[in-house]
Image (cartoon, rainbow, N blue to C red):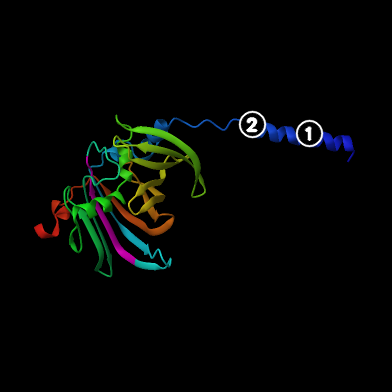
Amino acid sequence: MPRIVTRALAALIGLAAATFAGAAPPEQPEPRAVVERAVAAHGGAVWLDPGTLELSGTATFYDPATGAVRSTADDYRMWRTFEEGRTASHEASGKVRIVAKSGGKVIFEVGYDGATTWTERGIMPKPEADAYWASNFGFGIIRSALEDGFALHNAPPRDIGGRFARIVRIVDPKGQQTLFGFDAESGFVTYMAFDTPRGFHERLYGDFVRLESGWVQARRVTLLYDGIMANTVFWRETRVGTPLDPALFTPPRER
């Protein structure tokens, strides 16, 4: 190739590279618009105010020191009632009960009736309970994120599970922060993260299904602390808005 052509080609390549490097990145949508789209994508009004939620499936728990499977729950269930007007991201709210069983034997159980937390071993002291829920409660705050008193901020977008995701930082009225990742194509929540007493907590959501009501449920949820996978839950059945027996949330000493 003649030298003059080679120089011209090199100049064109250099110009293209400089133009690309100096090009402005694509503008991000406003964080409120990202959250509004997610609410609509997940079911709209029914997702914002479901009343109750009942999930059942299986779960696998890992030993953080060895990476080996520590236990497998072939019967994993959660019952949930929701508190309207929630303003605290990482504090217990509403009512919840989770039971993990293997071969009919309880691996663990935890519940909260709105005031008292208990496990299969009995009532949990409040300081311990507050730390426990601070390490686990977080997803539901997105249902309040569009209300007054909350601040929404864009964070740099990133790849989540091989797909481009928008990241929004939700700050509640108390200043507690939670990162949410939204799939850019579907609008679904595929990621959540926040600081906890147990370490930096992340969740990855996938395998979404839409119910007849319009509710969209992630059937695969993976939990990590400080980058180490703690467990993965596989939800098989989802019920939304159905009446729940109040006895489900009654502490053991009162049953």
Residue 77: in magenta span: yes
Residue 212 visible in the shown view: no
Q: Amino acid type of disc 2? A: Gly
Residue bearing mark 2: 22
Q: Is residue 17 above or below residue 130?
A: above
Q: Which mark is residue 11?
A: 1
User: Which residue in the rendered view is the most extreme toward the right?
Assistant: 2
Instruction: Between residue 236 and residue 222, name the one nearer to us.
Output: 222
Q: Quadrant of the N terminus?
A: top right
**Disc nearer the start of the sequence (2/1):** 1
Determine which quarter of the picture holds residue 63: bottom left
Circle count: 2
Q: Is residue 62 above or below residue 168?
A: below
Residue 32 is left or right of residue 83, and the answer is right
Dominant secondary structure of the residues highlighted in magenta in the image: strand
Residue at horizontal 65 percent and vertical 34 percent from the top: 21
Q: Is residue 253 visible?
A: yes
Which residue does the image show at 34% across and 50% down from the upper left? 196
Instruction: Assign the C terminus to one quadrant of the image.
Output: bottom left
| Residue beneath the point at 17% across and 53% down | 249
Q: Which region is colored magenta?
A: 72-83
Judge whether 217 appears above or below 119 on screen. above
Q: Position of residue 61 (x, y in %)?
A: 36, 63
Q: CA distance from mark 2 to mark 1?
A: 16 Å
Q: Is disc 2 in contact with disc 1, using a CB cutoff of under 8 Å?
A: no
